[in-house]
Image: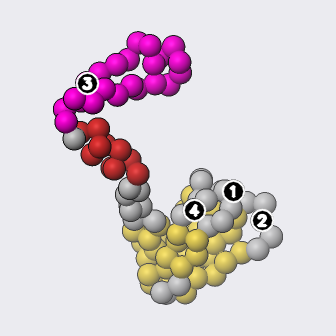
Amino acid sequence: MNTATLAFSRAAAARFHFTLPPGLLALLKRAAATSAPARSVVWELDAGANTWIVQPLGRTITCEAGTLWLTFDNEPQDVILEAGQSHRCAKGSKLLIHALASARLSLA
């Protein structure tokens, strides 16, 4: 059997030892190395409605229908998305999404 150590510090390493069944450690390592696809959230906004994304860094906003205006806090450049267009966020500042027309968007 494999012995694994769950350690958050050297002191914790001395206290937490456990034995895993054969193959489970390899399975867990393989699962940890494989990043799961980002869960996509879809919602609709009426014309004139707003929503905020607090930490957009690395997220992708896709306009599935309508028109969206994306504006980042303290950033001079805004983005307009029409149906079928996407924007991957390269900044971590808060993002305001405003529906210029009734819209459906997904966030992944």
Query: Closer to us: mark 2 or mark 4?
Result: 4
Query: Closer to us: mark 3 or mark 1?
Result: 3
Report the Cα–Cα distance between label 3 and label 2: 51 Å
Q: Which mark is residue 19?
A: 3
For the residues bearing labels 3 and 2, Cβ distance under 8 angstroms = no
Residue sitting at x 47%, y 17%: 12
- Of residue 32 and residue 82, the one placed in the foreground of this image is 32
Can residue 41 be seen in this snapshot?
A: no
Residue occupying the far front of the picture: 1
Residue that mark 4 sits on: 58
Query: Closer to us: mark 4 or mark 3?
Result: 3
Locate residue 14: give its quadrant: top left
Locate residue 34: give its quadrant: bottom left
Report the Cα–Cα distance between label 4 and label 3: 37 Å
- Of residue 23 and residue 62, the one placed in the foreground of this image is 23
Q: Is residue 23 above or below residue 101?
A: above
Q: Which residues are magenta?
A: 1-22
Mark positioned earlier in the residue sequence (4 or 1): 4
**Numbered disc 3: secondary structure:** strand
